[in-house]
Image (cartoon, helix red, strand yellow):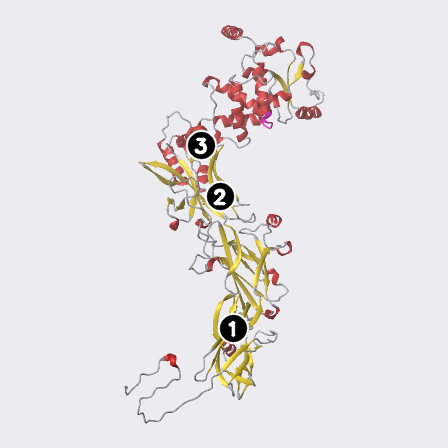
Amino acid sequence: MAQLQTLPADEQHGDCQLPLGYDGVVRIRAAPHLVLRPESQHQPTLLGMTEWQVQVGGSCENVAGYVPCRLEWIVHSDSFDERRMPHRRETCLVPNGRSFLVREKAGEGTRPLQISIYELGLIGNGSLGYRLEPLLFGNDAIEVKPGAPQAIPFELGARIDFRIAPDELTYDWVPDFIERKVRRERVGTLLQLMPDLPSIFKGQLATVELYPRPPEGLKPDANATVRIQWEIGASDAARVQMWRMGFLSVRGEDTEVLENRLAAIGGIESSETLTFQYRLTVSPKPDPEPAAGDKGAKKKAAAQPVERLQVDPRLAREVPRPRLKQFQVFLEKGKLGLRGAFENFSDSVALDLVVKPYVLLPDGKGSRVEQLDDYFRNVLLNFRHNASFRMGQSVDMYTQLCLPDDVATKLSELDTVTVTSQENTFSRELLDLKKLPHRYVEALSAIQGLQVFAAISPALGTGAREVPFWAIADYEASEPGVFSGFAPFEAGAFVSRVFSSGVCSSNTVDLAGHAARLYSPMPVVPPERQEEFALFVGTIVGEAIGQCEAAWKGVAHTIMNRVARTYEKWEDCLTPSEVIVKTGFDGRKHDNSKAALEYMKSPAASSYLYRDKIEQLISAVTAIFMRQAGDCGDVVFFYSPKAQRQLHEQKPSEYPLVPGFVGQKGDKELVDITATVLGNSKDDFRFFAFKHPEKFPRLTSQQMDAARAKRTVAKAK
């Protein structure tokens, strides 16, 4: 047999092996093996934040006298993950027959266990488990898991609910009446916080941080975080428990809103929803500020430990992600502008945006981008410098070709253009091409392939980082074969979204083609008849510009139907001009008629009164003047009952209440064809035709030629 045995293995515990013939001294240390069986205890009511007496104990064996022990708390709550914290004071096992209690050492004696809610960070609803380790050789620790029957439950509910703010709390915010009616929650909706905090927290300071949920692995964006703070249990707390979802909203001392603008609302532009989280913190109210000069008080205040209870981030609200839905440039009636729309913002949201128009020009096999105001300015300056003048040209003609101050001013306004979205839409006129001198419109119409688009970005603010546009705009337009979304844009160039501060419009407009049409607004009328056509248009404008389009056409037909008509002196009127001058069309003398003549000579230089209507009127009556439209019921008379009544009131002897032609009898009898002329339109005019039109036919072309020849002979004499 070997003289020396190996040492006992770890799992053999107290076994001891000695070599044969060993004659030394063997000291045997004996310790009781404690048997601890924790049991559930009746817990006193939680009455204070710092003095909660709890009991840990149960049945036991072999516990004699006070046995020092180490107590570690295992805390679990619905407000945070499980965590372990040692009891801050020394503890020991105290026997009582066949049971034991864990007590704190207090001088020469002991006292019941006492914990502070702040010491253990207790908040929410959960339970206190523990690990109890007797400091006695040979005895192992026992552990009670949170949630086990022997654990100590606590109920300190700490949740925040959210609801749309009631009317009585929105008086000093921008009221969102539509949202309150529709009862929908979107970014920008004003919400009221509804805290669920037990009365034991009364007098403590509650702080709620609200922020968009960050991507996994990242911390919340401090620049997008809203902090709301109030004293728990205060009567006026509801006034500050307000949150405008997705906005940085800060209250002043008098509850006025000092800052109320969009925060950085997330960075994944393809997400369908936007999630907001909140973190609740409860802490003691700070001591009052020490008096000036009290250095000792300041030092003491600085040494106070920072205690707080904090809830892990929880879901506040999940709403549809707001995004730019539409952004386009338009060119309508000579006006260049832009329009757009957002979706999933509250209708109370007003976003300030900066707009910049650009031109896109062919450049070799590609294209180049220039700012519209700079490009226009250079084009117009070059046109002025390159213009040549004959000696006989007047100063007025030279002035027309030079750059007027109002054009320079208008272009300078495009350097910084702002627009504000209202109820999720925005629109802005950028430039009215009709305000440019006519020759400049000619210069723009000569440029090949001139396209215009616009870029938009959030207006710069102060303080926190601005919202990146890619947070609310999908970048798909720059992808091949994709016709939705908006391309990222920065400093006059298409860039990647990493470097962009805005987006460009989803379309361009053909400015050169439109300028060419604007440069030639006169309809297709032979040159030799354009002067007569101008009088024709001016007369209709003077007679009926305030009426509907059907009335314009009715007046135009009246003039044309009287030409060379075998009725009284109409037979001698061989042209529309003669009808206008000789048969009572006084509208040609009206100021509106003069405005129409100015417009037809130079649309850009004419006055603005009725400008758009004059353009529409020209389109409506051209075909009638050129005998390319129907006869509209062969109308030959019209009048305005309202205007006739006013004239009658002013001069009753000169103007009857109803014109005399209405009551004509015999072959000249008329019929009212107002319904035929106006159709479904409502207007003040009444129109009439001959009841027997065959009695008053128009001259044939041969008869008209003969009448003209007769006039020529008469002039020659």
Residue behind mark 3: 437
Q: Earlier in the sequence, mark 1 or mark 2?
A: 1
Mark 2 residue element? strand
How crowded pointer 1 is (Cα within 10 Å; few <14, some 14-19, many 20+) is rated as many
For the residues bearing labels 1 and 3, Cβ distance under 8 angstroms: no
Q: Amino acid at mark 2?
A: Lys
Q: Can residue 545 be found in the magenta stretch? A: yes
Relative horizontal placement of residue 290, taking residue 400 as reference (left or right):
right
Task: Give the x, y percent position of residue 294.
Answer: 52, 77
Q: Which residue is mark 1?
A: 129
Q: What amino acid is found at the position of numbered circle 1 in the picture?
A: Gly
Q: Considering only vertical position in the picture, is 272 above or below 157?
A: above
| Numbered label attached to residue 325 | 2
Residue 127 placement (x, y as % from top left): 54, 70
Viewport quadrant of the N terminus: bottom left
Task: Name the magenta segment's main secondary structure.
Answer: loop
Question: Please, is residue 581 above or below residue 417 in the view?
Answer: above
Q: Position of residue 46 (x, y in %)?
A: 60, 73
Mark-to-mark CA distance, 1 and 3: 86 Å
In this orientation, which residue lies closer to the viewer: 599 or 187? 187
Amino acid found under the numbered disc labelled 3? Pro
Give the magenta part as a residue range. 544-548
Q: Nearer the viewer, mark 1 or mark 2?
A: 1
**Measured along the vertical axis of the image, is residue 580 above or below residue 510?**
above
